[in-house]
Image (spheres, helix red, strand yellow):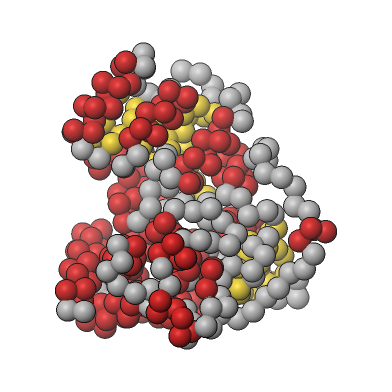
């Protein structure tokens, strides 16, 4: 084998996966692609395989695998096609893998991400649901295996860059007063409240600053994305929900801040481009070119901040409450949200029904103590069923 770092990209055809491959391609002297995985965009996965020539490709089912294997052979490629969750875990924990980009959206990314952690890999975590669903178990697995966990969400990556290296001793012990988690506010930060009932999926997916997939765009519009990030930050940085404050910053050039007890506030800034945190995590503790243009402060001109309105963004309140309850509550929140967002994108419910559905499920499903992954997965299944019942009755 070569001396290059071998990278598995879970969720290669999504926006994070494509940005990761862009950064990798800029540094052929440092990285090579070991495996690519995709779910529905098989033509794109084939095209990426032609460019990056991975050893393995993973698809969701046997029919897709047979079709893709034949297509890759016709391209003269010898990569092996694996199937399903078992295939995802195999390429995440493979002995020849150095780092895993965990960029599968939603609960589907939990098991392969956890497999990479348990194998002691360098894990670039873009799948926030893995921590939201199984935070205590996940972080214990990181400690037990000695895996290196590096956050990819721009906000968590910013916090990581602004904290001292020994932050694991506890935020108070390293002089941190609070963490300021920035949010753009999405496309509806100034929409009249009465009009939110009528917004369309197209409007919700039209983010003013970032180019993202449809699910995460809706989460940004509802600010559930920020709520999930709050829960994730609690686990990543061993923080209580009260130590994390969400701040709406419409320009999206300050990606988060850390407030110290001596009055210092450190901020990480940059253009809104996910290649910056990806490059940071890939090369950490070194720095490499990401392809992102330098930040032009004169063009930015001004920086605005405001408190989020939880009447406008009830999902943020629900996420904070779930973080405070703990146990399986965050997993229930996440599962109900996934069902709600899918229903909204299918035009089965209104935008404002997303929070109503989630709150109903949280009220009907009591939180349990998480002692094993099976408890989390069972809570996820039950929450989805309750969400579907809510759909059927409304």
Q: Is residue 11 left or right of residue 149?
A: left
Residue drawn at 53 percent across, 61 percent down: 207
Q: Quadrant of the C terminus?
A: bottom left
Q: Pick out the residue farthest to the right.
A: 298
- Choose between 319 and 271: the one closer to the eye: 271
Question: Residue 49's image quarter?
Answer: top left
Q: Is residue 267 left or right of residue 333?
A: right
- Choose between 187 and 140: the one closer to the eye: 187
**Residue 177 visible in the current orientation:** yes
Q: Is residue 213 left or right of residue 114?
A: right
Residue drawn at 42 percent across, 56 percent down: 214
Q: Position of residue 176 (x, y in %)?
A: 64, 71
Q: Is residue 262 above or below residue 27?
A: below
**Residue 365 visible in the current orientation:** no
Residue drawn at 61 percent across, 74 percent down: 247
Q: Position of residue 7 (x, y in %)?
A: 46, 33
Q: Is residue 31 above or below residue 378?
A: above
Q: Pick out the residue farthest to the top.
A: 76
Q: Position of residue 64 (x, y in %)?
A: 23, 33
Count up the numbered dots: 0
Question: Residue 198's image quarter?
Answer: bottom left
Residue drawn at 24 percent across, 64 percent down: 380
Q: Position of residue 54 (x, y in %)?
A: 41, 25
């Amino acid at each position: 084998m070569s001396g290059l770092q071998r990278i598995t990209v879970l969720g290669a055809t999504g926006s994070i996966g494509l940005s990761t491959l862009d950064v990798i391609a800029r540094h052929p002297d440092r990285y090579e692609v070991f495996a690519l995985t995709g779910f529905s965009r098989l033509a794109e996965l084939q095209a990426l395989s032609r460019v990056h020539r991975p050893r393995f490709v993973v698809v969701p089912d046997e029919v897709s695998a047979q079709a893709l294997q034949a297509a890759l052979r016709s391209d003269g490629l010898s990569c092996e096609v694996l199937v399903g969750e078992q295939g995802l875990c195999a390429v995440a924990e493979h002995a020849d893998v150095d780092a895993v980009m965990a960029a599968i959206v939603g609960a589907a990314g939990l098991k392969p991400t956890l497999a990479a952690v348990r194998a002691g890999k360098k894990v670039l975590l873009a799948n926030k649901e893995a921590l939201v669903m199984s935070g205590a178990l996940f972080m214990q697995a990181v400690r037990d295996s000695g895996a290196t966990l590096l956050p990819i969400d721009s906000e968590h990556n910013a916090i990581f860059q602004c904290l001292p290296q020994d932050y694991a001793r506890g935020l108070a012990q390293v002089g941190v007063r609070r963490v300021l988690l920035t949010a753009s506010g999405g496309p509806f930060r100034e929409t009249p409240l009465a009009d939110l009932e009528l917004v369309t999926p197209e409007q919700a997916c039209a983010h003013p600053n970032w180019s993202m997939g449809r699910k995460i765009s809706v989460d940004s519009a509802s600010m559930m994305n920020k709520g999930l990030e709050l829960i994730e930050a609690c686990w990543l940085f061993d923080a209580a929900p009260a130590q994390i404050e969400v701040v709406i910053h419409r320009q999206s050039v300050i990606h988060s801040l850390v407030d110290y007890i001596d009055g210092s506030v450190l901020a990480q800034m940059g253009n809104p481009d996910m290649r910056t945190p990806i490059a940071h995590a890939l090369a950490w503790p070194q720095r490499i070119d990401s392809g992102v243009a330098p930040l032009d402060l004169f063009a930015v001109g001004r920086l605005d901040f405001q408190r989020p309105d939880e009447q406008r963004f009830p999902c943020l309140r629900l996420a904070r409450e779930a973080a405070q309850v703990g146990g399986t509550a965050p997993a229930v929140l996440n599962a109900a949200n996934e069902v709600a967002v899918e229903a909204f994108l299918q035009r089965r419910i209104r935008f404002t029904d997303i929070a109503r559905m989630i709150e109903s499920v949280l009220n009907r499903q009591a939180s349990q103590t998480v002692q094993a992954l099976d408890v989390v997965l069972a809570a996820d299944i039950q929450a989805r069923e309750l969400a579907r019942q809510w759909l059927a009755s409304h």
